[in-house]
Image (spheres, rainbow, N blue to C red):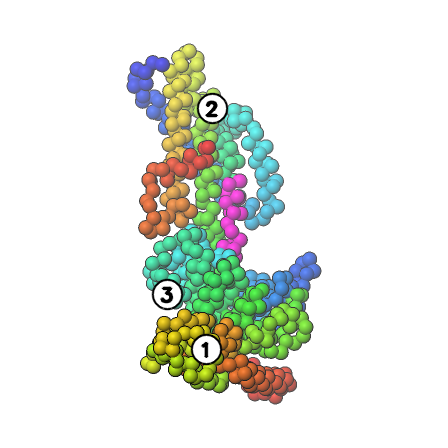
Amino acid sequence: MMWSWIPSNWSQIWELTRQNAFLGIVSPLIGLAISLPLGVVAARWRWFYPPTLVFINVVYAIPSLALFIALIPAFGLTDTTVIIGLTVFSLCVILPNVVAGLLGVPASVKQAATAMGYGPLRRLITVELPLATPVIIAGLRVGVVSSVSLASVGQIIGVSSLGYLFIDGEQRDFPTEIYVGLFMVIALAVVCDLILVGVRWALTPWAAGRNRVPGSRPRWALATALAPIIQERA
Amino acid sequence: MLWDAFAGGAEGRWLITFEGVTKRYPDGTVAVDNLDLDVPDGKTMVLVGPSGCGKTTTLRMINRLVEPSDGRILLGGEDIRAQDPARLRRGIGYVIQQTGLFPHRTVEDNIATVPVLNGWRRAKARARAQELLTTVGLDPALAKRYPHQLSGGQQQRVGVARALAADPPVLLMDEPFSAVDPVVRGQLQDQLISLQNELRKTIVLVTHDIEEAIKVGDIVALYHPHGTLAQLGPPERLLGAPADDYVAGFVGFDRGIRRLSFFRTDGLSLSAGPVLPATTTVASAIKTGEPWLLIVGSEADLTPRGWVSAERLAGLDGGTQLKDVATDGFGHTFTVGDDSLRAALDAAVLSPAGVAIGVDGDGRVVGMASFDQLRAAVQAAQAAQDALDARDVLDAQAAQQGQSPGATR
């Protein structure tokens, strides 16, 4: 490990991290944007969902490199190729969560909403989607972490990312570069994940365990924020 | 608006009318079979019957959660299909067993749901929510909590408050108290009765519990298992004159006793009875010659302290004051006028002396009722009720023939 290499190459490391973050974050967000309408349709017309799921799983089985190469004739060696590929993969993990989240809304709540006089669209937006949020964000977290990690593969087809440090380090037989690349990918994934935990926390003030009954013992805020991560990783 | 046509209508009109309504599901199941039913304005109608009898389907057809296969339903004289379902529903409160509260909204925002849908500003809707929390017997401090932070009974009260928020003329309640324990259920039923005395909504309540039906209903519609009515009438008539063996069986074997709940104690004759202040000596108490004596606080304080038997007094020193004698207690009393004959009978059964103690509103003894006096009162009340029922039946027959002007719709 050659620590002095890091400061002298920091601007390049930072630039690659930025590139990697862009590819790894934009793709699952597009995936989410596509998953929401698809998920709503699948939750509403249940027959639509099983074939979709089969299709998605087949796509998910395609190796990322193969998918990138297949997209090159259409989109060339560009960010677009990588983003499309990563979007497809993240769609595969986000869509099932959108469907599960919507189907998990208690029937009594949906019935009550209808009986109160909600139209279908208003019920979806103000009742069902908010209640599905924790499950949807759980899917988004997996999508973001895997996209951030997979984005490095884009380097093989020449799209700049932290993958550069792996390839270059291997070619020059210089392990420090590989370790730095690995560390940055993992750090990036963890930071993105923590941000999403924060987003969920902000969007679901009602979630069980969040709200103390007045008078009860206050909790340690950080422990509360970290608890779901620790539980889910265990 | 649908309601305008009805506002200020004549007393005793029907608010909800089912005309030959049938609900047949695609698999051929008939949930409701050619139902004719009138729900009077401002009354509580309870639909009761075994599971699968069509009572819930009947309820859900009123706010169009279920559409009838045949027949029509009128609300305030208008066919409910004439209005947009979402708008129709905002004028009908709805309470369900699982509460259906929105887990992601605070108590006040849950209650404010329909006012907000109707375009109220949030601040005004929340103020209304605060008001309603008090109405349903909850602490307004609960407003900022989320539903999962409340007990089952509290959640159910919030459900009722939410249904009342837009002040709808009609309230539909689907097994509203079935998911809570018996003590809380009793409290919620009492609350509903007192709310209804104040608000005079038209309530349609579904339950499988005949006790609940008898307790909260002005009118009870008892269903056969397959979507037809077995009997329709006030609860005391179901108890006193069940239409057939099915109704008698459903109502239960001690219906005679339960019917007494509907008879007041106004007409019950009371005797003065052996009431002695606690300062009386044992010697003078024995001199009354009564087998049982009721001890009260003093000449001025007529609250009962307990029964004591002449037998026990016989073994005591004549100079002892009654306040120093161990008593057998007095079970419970009944409030003359307010309590039913059932409460008075119960008081007599539980009393060691076999006599019910009648008290006034402040708990002061006003008289005693023996089993003989109770029997006379029960017989008189039953005769009066039977005469009333017979007249109602005649009226109903006349109405069917179109002769009674009071029965025109």
Crowding around mark 1 (Cα neighbors within 10 Å: few <14, some 14 to 19, many 20+) is some
Tell me the amino acid under the disc marked 1.
Answer: Ala
Q: CA distance from mark 2 to mark 1?
A: 102 Å
According to the image, label 3 marks what residue? B134
Q: Residue tagged by mark 1?
A: B310
CB within 8 Å, label 2 to label 1: no
Where on the picture, by quarter, is residue B137? bottom left
Magenta stretch: includes residue A97: yes
- Taking depth in this image into account, of B54 and A18 the one nearest to the observer is B54
Verify whether residue B308 appears in magenta.
Answer: no
**Disc 3 to disc 1: CB gap under 8 Å:** no
- Residue in the foreground of this view, choosing between A167 and B228: B228
SS of the residue under disc 3: helix
CA–CA distance in space, label 3 to label 1: 52 Å
Quadrant for residue B223, please give it.
Answer: bottom right
Badge 2 amino acid: Val
* Residue shown at 43% from the left, 18% from the top: A166
Bounds of the magenta segment? A96-112
Asked if marks 3 and 1 fall on the same chain, the answer is yes
